[in-house]
Image (cartoon, coloured by chain):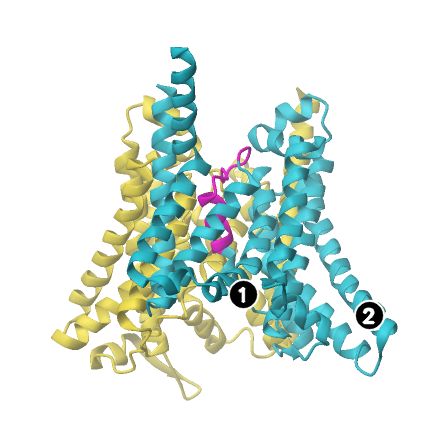
Amino acid sequence: MSTKVSSARGGLQAFLFGTNGSLTALLVSLLIVFTLIIGQKFLSPTTLQSMAFQLPELGILSLAMMITLLKGGLNLSIIATANLCALAMAFCLTRLVPGTEGLTSYALIAVSLAAGFVVALIIGLINGYVIAYLGVSPILATLGTMTLVKGLAIGLTRGNVISGFPEPIVFIGNGTIAGVPFGILVFLACAIPVSIWLSRTPTGNAIYMIGSNEKATRYSGVDTRRVMLKVYVASSLLAAVAAVVMMSRFNSANASYGESYLLVTILAAVLGGVDPFGGAGKVIGLILALVILQVISSAFNLMGLSQFLTLSIWGAILIGATAFALRYRNKQRR
Amino acid sequence: MLEIFMRFRRSHEFWLAMVILLLCIILTVATDSFFTLRNLSDLLTSNAFIGILCAGLIVVLVSGGIDISFTATATVTQYVALTIANAYGATWVTLFLMAGGIGIVLGAINAIFIERFKIHSIIVSIATLNIFYGLLIYFTRGKYIYTLPDFFTTGVNFFEFEYDQIPYSLNLQILLLVGSFLLTWFILNRTNVGRQIYAMGGNPDAAKRLGFSTFRLNLFVYCYMGFIAGVASLAQAQFAQSVAPTVLVGKELDVLAAVVLGGASLSGGVGTVLGTFLGLTLLALLQNGLVLIGVSSYYTQFVTGAVILISVSATALEAARQHRLKRARA
């Protein structure tokens, strides 16, 4: 009996000090503090809705970053990929769709979006091939593709913006279904399959294994190169989904949108408990981290504080949370 | 002598040097304006900011760490040092002392987080980048500074001379660029600390067991990076003739690209000052050359990306080939 109680207490303690538990605790305390400072307005439906509008872009991009971090890599080209995909989609949308109606219009929209995903697939294959089969370190390879892809986007558009999309596209980023922003549904439609992919499939399992020890995984009979290729392709395709949301929210596409997101995606993933050297991390942790970042950003906005102060608080929370997690892990080992 | 040459011939630096030489020959033949004193002086001056930072980042990479925060450090030092200089007056010496000092303090913050909390440098520096930059813009409201002290606006010009009616001189940017590379070379190759940094980067556990204080070494490495960022920020402000707090952050990956193109490994212990200089030269020549040849400047980034990708792939393939050869011999 007593052992049961103590193990239950141990479980609670493990939860509270584990990544997701401490993130939940942090989130709850932030919510309490901000509600006390700002008042009712903070938890009003309008605020919640605006948070849900802002979260998906960074959320989907962070997922794209996270899966590469899990396998012990990194993808610096996600933003550039998203922008080039958005431009490809925008180019097709503005050339093909105007003047068409009904089913043809929808079919052409689908074709336009598909064009963007093909671009993402190609970039993903290049990244995956160079990293998995040529053995280039991920940071170097994706630094190269980032420059290449962004350069291509600038070269093709001469830095100009493509704007003006048909109604259904605008809906993705700005519409709501029963009060719930459609974008957050898109985010969940990415996060849930990725979570299942990572935790319930052999490939997902192999990703974590490669992240903790690539050589051992290869010797145990896993085709590590194929798995790594898949990871970079998936990362690229997620960037393309982010491209759709971004393009729809801005109602335009450009070669250099959202560049400040790049390091923030790593920040979000690491805050969410992803080991930056691979092998550990869960989608649920990432979601908690994203909500925390969004809550801080929205609360600061309501309090009239600069977005730059938000940036520095995000940085401080990253250091604080990582230090806390490491300290707890070291204590456990002893 | 022959043996040294043979060893050099197989090195990464040799291939880089060959590519640069080829590029130089092509550009000299294809354009009239490349191999001129004017172009070379412009090249050095305009690439000084990125170049000086390269000289700092190579030390961090050799030590086995990474720093992303130096652009934020540079922004802060530039802003604070020149604001103080505007308010209370300053000389070259006090200005550099301030910039270097602030850089060292910010670098020490990085080092303390890395060593005391045992957090990896990439996480710490992503966080401190946001903290330094966010706080600076918050307190200054992102205002540009257009009026700078007179002596600073004039800059320094040693050995002034005229050639074809165009004045040339050894300006602040070139001096600082050359100075910082020499200083880094001296530290890494001619001092005890430098050799210890290589040892720590190659194998931190072994270095610890040999009795090296990794805390002191890391403190030195990140403070040096901060100091260099301070120096680079003054070169940039003098070149731009203003302080713009929002333009520097975002250039950190350009610096990283140049250093890793020069052969530095991200896992530490590997990398040379010569290689770094060649990597920087290659990227600078590429951008300069494309403009001179008449390629639309919209495409320079595309070509740069292609060169980085091809170069890192070729290096990886060559490394794999060497590895196979070694195995076959064994």
For the question of whether residue A46 can be seen, the reply is yes
Q: Does the stretch in magenta take in A264?
A: yes
Q: Write down the region rendered in magenta.
A: A263-280
Describe the element under mark 1 as helix, strand or loop: loop
Q: Colour of chain A?
A: cyan
Q: Is residue A1 above or below residue A228?
A: above
**In front: B249, or B266?**
B249
Q: Position of residue A42 (x, y in %)?
A: 39, 62
- The residue mark sitting in front, 2 or 1, is 2
- Chain on which label 1 sits: A
Q: Does the stretch in magenta take in A266?
A: yes
Local packing at callout 2 (Cα closer than 10 Å; few below 14, some 14-19, many 20+) is some
Q: Colour of chain B?
A: yellow
Q: Residue at x 38, y 25 (%)?
A: B205
Q: Pointer 1: what residue? A: A258
Q: Position of residue B157 (x, y in %)?
A: 29, 76
Q: Pointer 2: what residue? A: A106
Q: Quadrant of residue A144?
A: bottom right
Q: Which quadrant of the rendered structure holds the C terminus of chain B?
A: top right
